[in-house]
Image: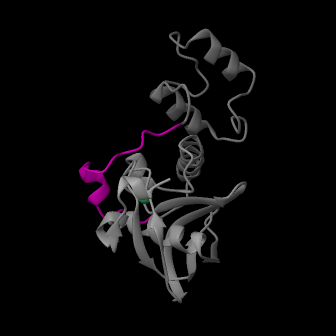
Amino acid sequence: MRCGALPRTLPETLFEKRVSGLPKNFRARPCVWVCEFEERGIEQAKLNIVKDGDPVLRKVCRPVETVTPRIRTLLDDMIETMRAANGCGLAAPQGGVLRRVVVVECEEGKVIELINPRIIAHAGKQEEAEGCLSVPGRWGITDRPRHVTVRALDRYGNEFDVSGSDLLARCFCHELDHLDGVLFTDKAIRMLEPDEVE
Ligand SMILES: [Zn+2]
């Protein structure tokens, strides 16, 4: 399909959105994105969250060699998916994409996008409850560093460092584990019983 061509089967409401420049970022996104959007026949750019038991969650993800528009689209889709699911973090394999890409939003509006992230420093220790969008309804106590510094690429391919403490540090550790096929249930000191969860 040619870029910009609208499929005939597109529902009227979606057509309206398309021609009026929505969904958000539509104009800012390059041609290739439009093609992908159409091929997926999407209503939204949300990803299906893969659940525990799916082998995808156990694979080691490949690094991103070049940060292309496609990766930026993936980041956008991951943010939308994370927010729709009320999560504070999402790793690409949870959306079925085996690339080293993570988004985190522990504080509303403060989205941190991480491409090829790695932990370069950590300190302290915390034992707190943790859950996962891929392991719905289950919580466990994990042993994580209190402070973590991550080095990653941003959506334009620039390297940067970001530090976080407490929940943000846990979130960094949790999401980066996903990139190596590790779930919090592997690391939990103990899982919580249903009556321990509010
Ligand atoms: Zn998770």
| Colouring used for the render | one colour
Q: Would you say the magenta stretch is mainly helix, strand or loop?
A: loop
Asked if the magenta segment contains residue 50, the reply would be yes
25 relative to 43 in the view: left or right: right
Residue 42 visible in the picture: yes
113 relative to 91 in the view: left or right: right
Q: Is residue 37 above or below residue 58?
A: above
Percent position of residue 1, x then y: 49, 24
Q: Is residue 26 above or below residue 108?
A: above
Q: Is residue 146 above or below residue 19?
A: below
97 vs 135, nearest the viewer: 135
The magenta region covers 46-64
Q: Which residue is at a point 64% across and 76% down the rendered structure image?
A: 160
Percent position of residue 104, x then y: 58, 60
8 relative to 156 in the view: left or right: left
Q: Which residue is at a point 24% across and 52% down the rendered structure image?
A: 55
Residue 183 visible in the picture: no
* Residue 58, picture quadrant: bottom left
Percent position of residue 35, x then y: 53, 32
143 vs 195, nearest the viewer: 195
Ligand number 1: quarter of image? bottom left
Q: Which residue is at a point 59% across and 48% down the rendered structure image?
A: 79
114 relative to 64 in the view: left or right: right
Percent position of residue 70, x then y: 53, 48
Q: Which residue is at a point 31% across and 55% down the rendered structure image?
A: 57
Asked if the magenta segment contains residue 33, the reply would be no
